[in-house]
Amino acid sequence: MKVGKFLLLILMFILCKVKAFEPVLMFFSNSPEYVKKDGYLISGTISGFTPTLIYFYHLNDTLEDKKIYLVLTGKCEAYINFAFSSSKDSYFKVGNDIAREIFKNFNPTKYYIDGRYIFEIDFKPQFLVSGYFWIYSNGRIDFDSWVGNVKYRYILPTDRKHVKGIFGIGRIVTYVPEDLNYLVVGDIPLDGIETNMVLKGTYKVFYHFIVNRRIRSIYFSARGGPSIPIYLIKSSYEELVYTSGGVYRPYDEIKIFDREIYMEELITQPIGACYYPVYYRIDD
């Protein structure tokens, strides 16, 4: 077996054990947020053995059915996980759907890229579409993404309000002292590697809070604006994933977990359409 294939298998084995393999890089495509014509969204290169996320957040501001295309070009093996959601009037639902897929249904599939591989995502009129491709390969992959039927390389201009670019993401690990009960998420903007502006809310960064104590309840408080809580609790005996369809107003503190449990770690992530920062308060 070649070294590249062996390393790919070993790291995918680790992925299956830990349930989530935090990406090293993210290509974030949110500008223009309102897409009014056909054109290219974002393009780039994925290096071998570098877990990468390509994340989309766009609204089809036309009266035509369109598609978002993602084309991967290369010659290698890759594990790919992707999930998309859309809505015409419930943007919070879209963000919650995608987060649920990451925390509960993350299960990459093996693909053989030999030349070009094309993915298509439905993009209905006046619908918000959001989602991601998580890609981990044993070789270089170039990618292009665009909307509609593009006859020449027209790059859609940014709208100066939203973000497009490359970010180094991954995880933020915080060891929580015994006397600290507030966990703050999304309070520091994420600087880009190649981008038009900073990414407020540190979207798609995994926050790992190492708690290692018995708790009785968890409270949630939205501070930056309306938000939805989502998290994964890890203990020696079980893993609990919490997602909510409810949207909470700023500064309302709501009990969202009511059960005594030994919490080793709480993992959460800022999700689309929500406002940050948010607070989680654990009650001993």
Image: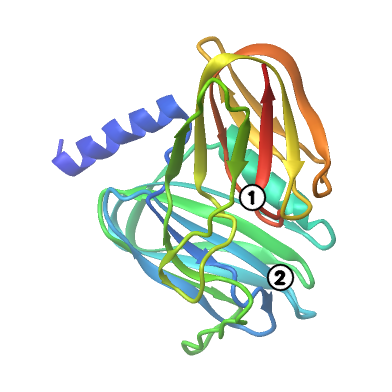
Q: Quadrant of the C terminus?
A: top right
Residue plotted at (50% across, 25% down): 177
- In-front residue for pair 101/9: 101
Residue at mark 2: 59
Residue 281, given in percent of the width and then of the height, sits at 68, 31
Residue 254, given in percent of the width and then of the height, sits at 81, 33
Compared to 232, does 260 lie above or below?
above
Q: Among all residues in the image, which is located at the extreme left?
A: 2
Residue 199, given in percent of the width and then of the height, sits at 54, 63
Q: Quadrant of the N terminus?
A: top left
Badge 2 vs badge 1, beta-carbon distance below 8 Å: no
Q: Which mark's residue is nearer the viewer, 2 or 1?
A: 1
Which element type, helix, strand or loop, lies under badge 1?
Answer: loop
**Amino acid type, residue under disc 1 in the picture:** Ile
Residue at mark 1: 271
- Whether residue 105 appears in this view of the structure is no
Residue plotted at (60% across, 33% down): 104
